[in-house]
Image: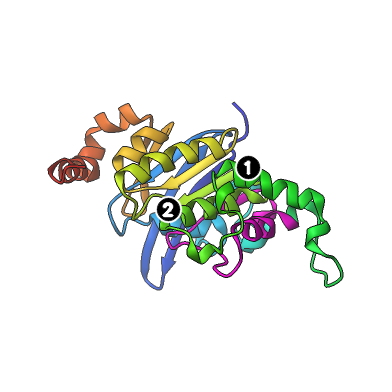
Amino acid sequence: MSTPALELRDLRKSFGRTEIIRGANLSVQPGERVAIIGPNGAGKSTLFNLISGRFAPTSGDVLLNGERINGKRPFEINRLGLSRSFQITNIFPKLSVFENLRCGVLWSLGYRYTLFRFLNSLSDANERAEDLLRKIHLEKKRDVLAMNLTYAEQRALEIGITIAGGAQVVLLDEPTAGMSKSETERFIELIREVTVGKTLLTVEHDMGVVFGLADRIAVVVYGEVIACDTPDAVRANERVQEAYLGSVLAEQQAGGH
């Protein structure tokens, strides 16, 4: 088996005396799509923050392509090939859609901070930004300020920025939160398109999204990964049903979701 794209080894995180992540173990293969599910307060967002470098683990390791990355700063991890989005849309509201994407590609193309270079002359950066525009289906909104996009369009733009640097491991934190059913369906297709050939780890509450997108599902309960398997196997797992899944599916069916 190849080296995992992302691996968690006995990962733990405490805040004061409260242990939030309690020995989490997870291995994600290159090109695999894994969804993380679990009840509120299970530690899903904390796991993302540990992986992306926002938090340092109390103990244990995070490995990216076999390299230990815990202790590195977020921008250092990003430059090693891991990028993430957030629950709250994180874009440059007063820049155009195109300018947002171009900002995202500059560092990966070798452009550093300088006051003596006109961005419009950077043909490679402009070409990559135009390509991203097409991938996220926002060509018609190219010159619109990001603040004037719809919510779903802003989320699409954020995904464009997330993949702009060429990261091969992509973390998406509740990417369809707040979307209508039709928006969610279109967004799942967009995620599939833009992450072809990439490794995807996503936190998601919508079981329709989870079962429709993920190759495997990791179930986090009380800071531990209690199961990680195919959607069908997770659905049939009695421990998962008892801990989480049965009640969620029942709630969504009752609510007409």
Mark 2 lies on a secondary structure that is: helix
Q: Is residue 76 above or below residue 80?
A: below
Which residue range is magenta in the image? 78-106
Q: Is residue 151 above or below residue 200?
A: below
Left-right relation of 235 to 256: right
Q: Is 46 or 56 nearer to us in this picture?
A: 46
The part of the image, by quadrant, that contains residue 44 is bottom left
Q: Please tell me which of labels 2 and 1 falls first in the chain.
A: 2
Q: Residues within 10 Å of mark 1 (few under 14, many from 20)?
A: some
Q: Is 214 or 129 nearer to us in this picture?
A: 129
Left-right relation of 41 to 33: left
The residue at 33%/42% (across/down) is 182
Left-right relation of 57 to 250: right
Mark 1 lies on a secondary structure that is: loop
Q: Amino acid at mark 2?
A: Ala
Left-right relation of 251 to 225: left
Q: Position of residue 155 (x, y in %)?
A: 47, 54
Q: Position of residue 223 (x, y in %)?
A: 36, 54
The residue at 23%/45% (across/down) is 244
Residue identified by numbered label 2: 152
CA gap, disc 2 and disc 1: 24 Å
Q: Is residue 46 above or below residue 124?
A: below
Disc on res. 168:
1
The residue at 37%/71% (across/down) is 17
The N terminus appears in which quarter of the rendering? top right
The C terminus appears in which quarter of the rendering? top left
